[in-house]
Image (spheres, rainbow, N blue to C red):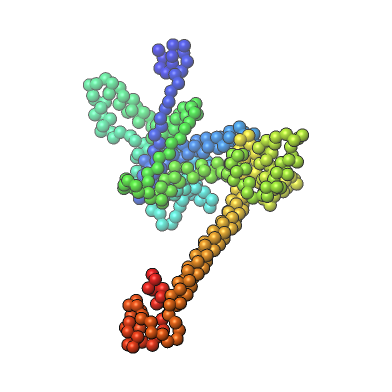
Amino acid sequence: LPSGRDTSGKPYPYIGLLDIFGFESFNVNDFEQICINHANEVLQKKFTHDIFTSVQDEYKSEGIYLDDVPFVDNCDVLNLIEGKMGVINMLNEECVIPKSSESNFVSKLNMAHNKPRTRFIRKKTFAPNQFGIKHYAGNVIYTANTFIAKNLDTLPQDVIDATVASNNPLIKQFCLAIQREKKSNKRDSIISNTVWTKFKLQLKQLLSDIEKTKTWYVKCINPNKNRDPHSFNLKYSLSQLHCAGVLSAVQLSRQAFPNRLLFTRTIHRFRILVKSDWFRNKIRSSSILGGEVDIVTKVKILLDELLKCEEVISADGNVIKAYECGNTHVYFRTGAIEHLETRRLKVHDRCAAKIQKFVRRKKSMKLITANEEEQEETNTIIKFFKSFFPSKGGSIQFPSMFRDCYGSANPSKRKSRPIEDDDILRYVR
C-alpha cells in the first residue's frame, strides 16, 4: 500500500505530536540559539493566528459583529530574520564572499538596520561580532563568532580526500558529489545548501503540514528551577508564560470584549443593583399580552439601566453600548464589568454594615438586660442581709463570716467599720 493511505486511496487520519524547543537566552548565544528562536518566532505567529481565529469564530457563533481588532504580532521580527535584508540572507551572502568574517557580517547588519524603531539591537558597548534581536519573548544578544562556519557546515578537505579514496562505492559516490559541488563553487548552490536555508525550508514544510490539521496547544510551566515539590516561584513562572506566548494570547482574546458572563449569571450577580419594584414593572411593561419575557430582554433591561454612564457616542453619532448580547453570553467592553463590580461591592458593604448594626445592637441589649437582672438580684440580697443588722445599737452576735470586716466576732473587740455591700456579696458568692 502507498505510505499513509488505505485500500481506497484515502489518506489515513493521524495525530501528530510536535515537541517545540523552548525560547533560549543564555549568557553567550550562538548560531544554535538563533535557529531555535527563529523556529519559536515562526510557531508563535501560527499560535497567535490560531488564537485570533478562535476568538473570531466564537464571536461569529454568538452572532456578534466584530470589527477588525488590532493585535500585536511578530511579523516585524520575522521580517528582520527572513526578509530581503534579513539576518538569513545577509549571513548567506557573507558565506559566499571570499575572506568573509563574522565582524563584517555584523557590521553590514548594523548598517542595514539603523532605523530607530526596529527589532534589531545595536549598542556601542557591543563587541564587533555581537548584535541583538528583540524577540517576542525578550531581548537576546547573539555572539557571531562561529556563524559562518556553522552555517556552511562543510567537511574538511582532508576528510573528503580520504573518503573519495574509499573502497565502499556508496561512500565514494557520495563524497565525489560533494567534491564536485565544492569545486563548482556556484553562488546559488552554496546558498541553497547552508544550514539556515535548509532549516528555513524545513520550517516552511512543517507549517504546511500543521495547516492541514486541527491544532491544539499544550503549554507546560515549570513552577521552580530546583524541581522542589510544593514550591512555586512567581517570577520564574511568569517569565515562562511570557516566553511561551500565553500572555500575548490572553491580551489578544481580551482585545474587543475582555469579559463575558452567561445570561443567568448576569441576572443573579447584578440584580441587587436595581430596585425590585422598578425591575418587575419594567419586565411587566416589556411583556406582550402578559406573556413570559425571555432572559435576553431581562438582561438588556438590567444592563441598559446600569451601564448608561459607560455608553460612548461614535463619530457618526451612533451610541455604542458597553455590552453586547450573544446567543448564550453577555460580552462586556473594557471597563464595563469593573464598573458593575464596584457598584456591587458598595451595595454589599452597605448591607454588611446594616447586618453588623443589628447584630451589635442585639448583643448590646442582651448584655444590658443581663446586667440589669444581676443588679436587681444583688440589691435583693443586700436588702435581705441588712435586715438582720440594725443600724443602731443591739447586742447581736456577728457570725464568723464578718471577721475579715471587723477583725473579731466579739462585739467588744470588733472594729468600728460598718459592713459594706461588697462584704455581703463576697460571702454570698
Which of the pair 381/361 is nearer the observer? Answer: 381
Lateral position of residue 319 relative to residue 423, left or right: right
Residue at (73, 44) in percent of width and height: 281
- Indicate the position of residue 343 as horizontal and vertical percent values: 61, 53
Closer to us: 185 or 321: 321
x 45%, y 84%: residue: 391
| Quadrant in the rendering for residue 254 | top right
Farthest-out residue, front: 395
Q: Position of residue 268 (x, y in %)?
A: 60, 43
Question: Can residue 216 be seen?
Answer: yes
Which residue is nearer to you in this view: 173 or 60? 60
Quarter of the image where one finds residue 14 = top left
Which is more toward the observer, 178 or 424? Answer: 424
Residue projecting furthest to the left: 167
Residue shown at 77% from the left, 34% from the top:
289
Quadrant hosting residue 186: top left
In the displayed structure, 295 sits above or below 112; it is above
Q: Is residue 91 visible?
A: no
Q: Residue at x 36, y 28 (%)?
A: 181
Viewport quadrant of the C terminus = bottom left
The single residue placed furthest to the top in the displayed view is 7
